[in-house]
Image: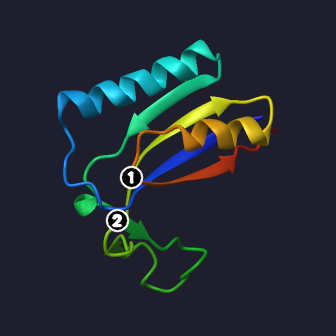
Amino acid sequence: MKVMLLMWSDGSYAGGGTADDYAAWADYETLLKREEVFVESGQFADAGESLSIKTALTLPDSTAGKTTPLQTSENSALVGYYVLECPSRAEAVRFARLAPLYGSVEIRELAEY
């Protein structure tokens, strides 16, 4: 099964950007590759520039396409993602729990057509 792990920081970690932080993420990615589940990953830019867009189907009047700042809880931030090819949901959970992240990991199965 192909899954996306959405990495949500809870804002409780004051550090970040140190050599140790980067090493922890490099070690995590090395593990995923060694276990042959890694497909791709990415890090999101600062959420300050993120937008939420209502589509024309949602708001068919003149407000469709209006941009508004992305609404998130006060301290949480979507910071990155991994796409994995896992043999089971249990394995996806196992890899999510190993992420070097102060926060939570949302696991979403990707539809395959």
Residue 15 relative to residue 76: left or right: left
Residue 81 at x, y = what percent?
48, 41
Residue 23 in which image quadrant: top left
Q: Is residue 3 visible?
A: no
- The residue labelled by disc 2 is 51
Residue 18 relative to residue 85: left or right: left
- Specify the amino acid type for callout 2: Leu
Residue 48 at x, y = what percent?
23, 62
Reply above or below: 47 against 38.
below
Quarter the N terminus occupies: top right
Label 1 residue SS: loop
Reply above or below: 13 against 62.
above
Measured Cα–Cα span from mark 1 to mark 2: 24 Å
Residue 33 at x, y = what percent?
56, 16
- The residue labelled by disc 1 is 102
- Specify the amino acid type for callout 1: Tyr
Label 2 residue SS: strand
Reply above or below: 33 against 56.
above
Mark sitting earlier along the chain (1/2): 2
Residue 39 relative to residue 72: left or right: right
Give the residue displayed 63% in from the left and 31% down from the top: 84
Quarter the C terminus occupies: top right
Number of other residues with Cα within 10 Å of mark 2, as a class: few under 14, some 14 to 19, many 20 or more: few
Residue 60 in which image quadrant: bottom right
Between residue 94 and residue 86, name the one nearer to us. Answer: 94
